[in-house]
Image: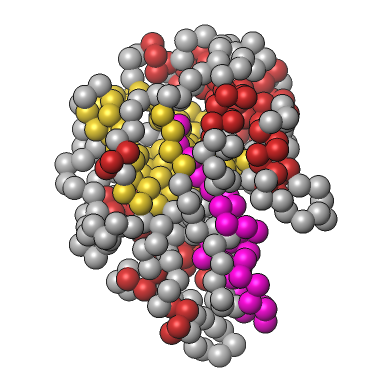
């Protein structure tokens, strides 16, 4: 069935979600951040995405074409810089998605959500222990060259209940019971001192619960983008944070009572709620980059139906590992997820947009500059 669905949308025909009267939910790390549009060795310009969105940029055209081919009903975009809605997501919709790309039908998302993130948000501390308190990059609340770098956005063809959105952007790391504090291997002391630990935020970008109304039923889209568990040292500070950011998802869908959102509302998701976890979680269950202690929090969670694993023929034929078909990033890992609740949702199909090398569509993903170093992942579901 998955092969048939892939052939259908690759050829621009009616997608399987429409044919089966199901809902297509997707996640896509689109690499639409300022570093992608800044010349090498030049200072990163916070307006670089805005400028690219106005200039028929080839990478963004390819991103839009992929979206028009897969045609998700609900889509999380990771690494989409947080700038004003008018200059960011609205530009993308008007200048790219609403215009046919390579003869594909335009696609309209009447509803969208974008909000502040922790990336590039300055702190006064030397959090990465490089001897300099720069405020940004490794010393920010989340790694970023400027506030809003590597942000997130959600596009939806169904109404978002904006009044009931919950965000946990400011939730403090210290308030997670038994949080994984990294230890400085040189001193044996906590990596973060007490002053730093009192203010650090857990989410490297943010954490969103977006209630979306689909034919009279509510689907909670649980969106985030945990930090990569690399780019650190033996203290494994990013690995530990990645684990706890994924734990935040687990605890939120489990309605842990220690949680609080940015409005001070306590607790997580109410029991018997339909939800789908989406995002580049930067954690792989298999391979040389595997962190099963992190991924098992979700993939072996009784509240989550993880039985259907989206896959692609393109990845399967490109790499030798037996689990390569599930890869979602060109650097050979499954790190992007669409994970529905066991309650109230049936899974019908899904896939990863990764054309084989002899396909005409391979041009869309042939290297990281063509579109992204990640692939779009989707599931076709129905709410019951």
Where residue 206 appears, x then y in whole percent? 44, 54
Residue 100, picture quadrant: top right
Residue at 51%, 81% in the rendered image: 191
Where residue 375 appears, x then y in whole percent? 57, 35
| Prevalent SS, magenta region | loop
Instruction: Using the image as rendered, state which of residue 272 and residue 213 is in the foreground.
Output: 213
Up/down of 354 relative to 4, above or below: below
Where residue 31 appears, x then y in whole percent? 63, 42
Can residue 26 be seen at all in this image of the molecule?
no
Residue 158, picture quadrant: top left
Can residue 82 be seen at all in this image of the molecule?
yes
Instruction: Using the image as rendered, state which of residue 307 and residue 322 is in the foreground.
Output: 307
**Could you tell whether 114 is left or right of 366 in the image?**
left
Is 212 a magenta residue?
A: no
Up/down of 302 relative to 183, above or below: above
Q: Which residues are drawn in magenta?
A: 128-155
């Amino acid at each position: 069935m998955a092969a048939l669905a892939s052939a259908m949308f690759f050829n621009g025909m009616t997608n399987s979600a429409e044919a089966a009267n199901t809902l297509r939910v997707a996640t896509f790390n689109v690499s639409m951040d300022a570093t992608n549009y800044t010349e090498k060795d030049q200072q990163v310009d916070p307006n670089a995405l805005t400028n690219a969105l106005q200039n028929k940029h080839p990478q963004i055209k390819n991103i839009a074409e992929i979206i028009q081919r897969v045609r998700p009903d609900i889509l999380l975009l990771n690494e989409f810089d947080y700038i004003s809605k008018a200059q960011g997501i609205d530009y993308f919709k008007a200048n790219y998605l609403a215009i046919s790309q390579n003869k594909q039908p335009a696609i309209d998302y009447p509803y969208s959500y974008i909000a502040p993130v922790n990336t590039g948000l300055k702190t006064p501390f030397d959090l990465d222990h490089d001897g300099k308190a720069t405020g940004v990059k490794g010393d920010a609340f989340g790694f970023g060259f400027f506030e809003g770098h590597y942000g997130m956005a959600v596009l939806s063809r169904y109404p978002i209940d904006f009044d009931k959105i919950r965000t946990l952007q400011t939730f403090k790391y210290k308030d997670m019971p038994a949080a994984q504090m990294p230890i400085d291997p040189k001193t044996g002391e906590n990596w973060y001192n007490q002053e730093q630990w009192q203010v650090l935020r857990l989410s490297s970008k943010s954490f969103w619960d977006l209630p979306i109304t689909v034919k009279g039923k509510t689907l909670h889209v649980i969106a985030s983008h945990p930090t990569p568990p690399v780019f650190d040292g033996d203290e494994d500070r990013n690995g530990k944070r990645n684990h706890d950011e994924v734990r935040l998802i687990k605890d939120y869908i489990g309605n842990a009572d220690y949680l609080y959102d940015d409005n001070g509302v306590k607790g997580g998701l109410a029991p018997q709620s339909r939800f789908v976890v989406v995002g580049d979680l930067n954690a792989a269950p298999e391979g040389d980059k595997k962190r099963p202690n992190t991924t098992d929090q979700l993939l072996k969670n009784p509240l989550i139906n993880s039985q259907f694993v989206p896959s692609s023929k393109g990845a399967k034929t490109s790499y030798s590992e037996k689990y390569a078909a599930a890869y979602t990033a060109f650097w050979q890992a499954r790190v992007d997820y669409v994970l529905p609740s066991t309650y109230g949702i049936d899974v019908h199909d899904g896939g990863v947009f990764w054309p084989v090398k002899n396909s005409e569509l391979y041009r869309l993903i042939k290297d990281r500059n063509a579109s992204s170093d990640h692939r779009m992942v989707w599931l076709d579901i129905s709410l019951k």
